[in-house]
Amino acid sequence: MTDARVCAVAEFQMSALKFSANISWLFTEFPEITRRLRAAASAGFQAVEAAWIYDTDITELKRVKDETGLEFVLINTPPGDLKNGDLGLGAVPGREQEFRRGLDLAVEYAKALDCSRIHLMAGRVPAEVDRTAVAMEMEDTFVQNLKHAAGVLSKEKILGLIEPINTRITDARYFLDSPHQAAGILQKVGHPNIKLQMDIYHWQIMDGNLTQNIRKYLPMTGHIQIAQVPDRHEPDSDGELNFSYLFKLLEELNYQGYIGCEYKPQRSTEAGLDWVRRYWTSHKDL
């Protein structure tokens, strides 16, 4: 192998990972989303993501985003009526029109913020209903809504994502709860503009086998999120996961997307950022 090819292979294998601050979880010392944006930029992040930003004026969000130079990489579709138990509407039969209206609102915000990804939230199995009794109907609803979303988002050059959320700790009634279920749904949707959102926290709780699952599903993944298991704190806090190993694995697999920091800081957000600063320092020349 020539020296040029050796260098090219080394560069391919050692591409540094990119991290975004999830401002629904980080910098919550500040109640206003715009102040969290400024705090993320001051801390060294070049990108942010958020769950729901629909209570914040879209013009103000864009102004602060432009002032800080931050990239907005992900937002969620509206959850529906949180007070009445909604957590997304994508797989909820009979709520298709509400899902479409929520998607249109998410697209409006995403376009204003130059945000290229929208998490299309599946929603919950109805209370007091057996999951297996409604699984087929909810999957059919989800697939049809995702096909509609694919058409809408592809015109805007926005990527749609679906995220399995664990039902053992976080939300017992969430419909989409494993990478295998999500992969099957993506196959039925059959559109390259709808991909998988890999939250390593949820995947470890529901299935484990992270090395093989990451290798298997990374080609269909459009975004990754991280937190330590089981307490959902910083990646370098005590827990089940070895993030040094997982980061090296993602580097070797040449993952080029963002990794969202979606965790609960143990103290202040700033006090818990040593892990990402160590990563930035060790990879500054890559």
Image (spheres, rainbow, N blue to C red):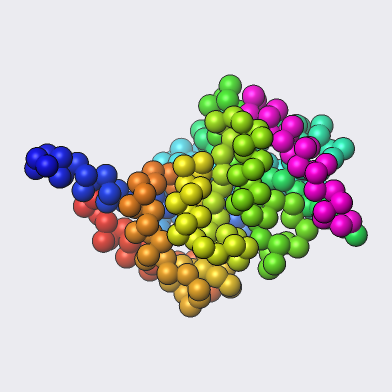
Give the residue drawn at x 51%, y 63%. Answer: 209
Q: Nearer the viewer, residue 240 or 47?
A: 240
Q: Horizontally, is 172 left or right of 270 in the view? A: right
Residue 70 in sight in this render: no
Residue closest to the far right: 128
Say whether residue 255 is left or right of residue 105.
left
Magenta residue span: 129-152
In the rendered view, would you say 64 is above or below 249? above
Pick out the residue farthest to the left.
Answer: 3
Q: Residue at x 87, y 37 (%)?
A: 94
Q: Quadrant of residue 136?
A: top right
Specify whether residue 278 is in view.
yes
Q: x, y (%) of residue 146? A: 68, 34
Picture residue at 42% right of the left edge, 65% below the top: 243
Quarter of image, res 167:
bottom right
Residue 31: image location, x then y, percent = 62, 58
The front one of 217 and 263 is 217
Q: Main secondary structure of the magenta part?
A: helix
Q: Is residue 144 left or right of residue 76?
A: right
Q: Position of residue 285 (x, y in %)?
A: 21, 52
Q: Position of residue 16 (x, y in %)?
A: 31, 51
**Which of the 4 image quadrants contains residue 71?**
top left
Q: Residue sitting at 72 percent across and 46 percent down?
A: 122
Residue 147: say if magenta.
yes
Q: Residue furthest bottom?
A: 238
Residue 3 lies in the magenta-colored region = no
The N terminus sits in image quarter? top left
Q: Nearer the viewer, residue 196 or 43?
A: 196
Q: Is residue 122 above or below residue 31?
A: above
